[in-house]
Image (tube, rainbow, N blue to C red):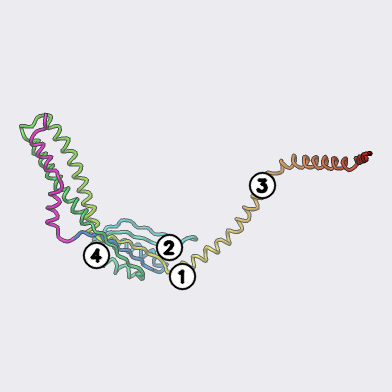
Amino acid sequence: MNPHPDFNMAFEGRGGGQGRVDVLAGTVGRYTAETQKIELVTPDSELQKAWESLVTFCASIRCELVSSSITTRAEDSTPTGSISLRAVPEDAGKLFAEAEKFGKITQHTTEREDKTTAVIDTEAKIKNLTGFRDNLRNMLGKPSATVKDLVEIQQQLMETQSQLDSETAQRKVLASETEKIFVQLLLRVPRNASTVSSWSQVANAFRQSGAILAESTASVITTVVAMIPWLIFILPAFWLVRKLWRRSRLRRATVPAAPPATL
């Protein structure tokens, strides 16, 4: 038995080609994902304050904080801070100006990725899935639909809604990537501060040399103690073998030589 005629008509409206042409016809400009990487050099004493102030400043503008972390000075590392965020283009400049209050921007790179095709395809899928879902909903209210048709329509409606939710979520992600600038901000101390930290590592190595020497001596003592039980058996055996060898050598030396044969 063939499905309800309206059910077939709903399926025929699910294709994506025409929808993509319609979206292309109405598209103005391109969709670009922009990433800006900034390296800020700030004094060691100002690093913590700069990191906290920039995180707080992000909350005061049209900015979304993605992640942030800071590493304080340790014996084996220099202090650094990092902030990842998304800001609208109009407020990104304000963020950069705020960062320059705490130090000097030594590196600023910009990367761009074209997302136009992804946006157009996603919007076309959303348009077609929305129309297909609406057709299915209208078919549920028709009195000519049989019980079997209603079951099939309801199942297809659930699958279509799930696909539509997924594409809608993807479009929100693309909107965040193309409507806001992704900023990666790295905070570090001057190079001379890093040099001081390197010398502190050398000093720390000298401090640890005594402990390393003690551990090595302990290992040697442990090895010697472990060999003592074996020496109790090895030394007498070596003495016995040496004695037997000397006795055998002595016997060979005392045996008289055989007289020469007479003709």
Residue 109: x percent and y percent?
Answer: 32, 66
Q: Secondary structure at mark 3?
A: helix
Residue at far front of view: 263
How far is the residue under mark 3 from the one under mark 2? 43 Å
Q: Secondary structure at mark 2?
A: loop
Q: Is residue 217 magenta?
A: no
Q: Which residue is mark 1?
A: 192
Check whether the beta carbons of the residues at disc 4 and disc 2 lie within 8 A of each other. no
How far is the residue under mark 2 from the one under mark 1? 13 Å
Q: Is residue 14 magenta?
A: yes
Point out the tag, 1 or 4, that comes first from the N-terminus: 4
Give the residues drawn in magenta, as a range.
Answer: 1-29
Q: Seen in the image, is 49 located left or right of residue 34?
A: right
Where is 30 relative to 130, above or below?
A: below
Q: Secondary structure at mark 4?
A: helix
Q: Which residue is mark 2?
A: 79
Q: Amino acid at mark 1?
A: Asn
Q: Seen in the image, is 248 located left or right of residue 222?
A: right
Q: Which residue is mark 4?
A: 91
Q: Which residue is mark 3?
A: 223
Say few, some or many: other residues with alpha carbon within 10 Å of mark 3 (under 14 / 14 to 19 / 20 or more). Answer: few
Point out the tag, 3 or 1, that comes first from the N-terminus: 1
Residue 152: x percent and y percent?
Answer: 15, 33
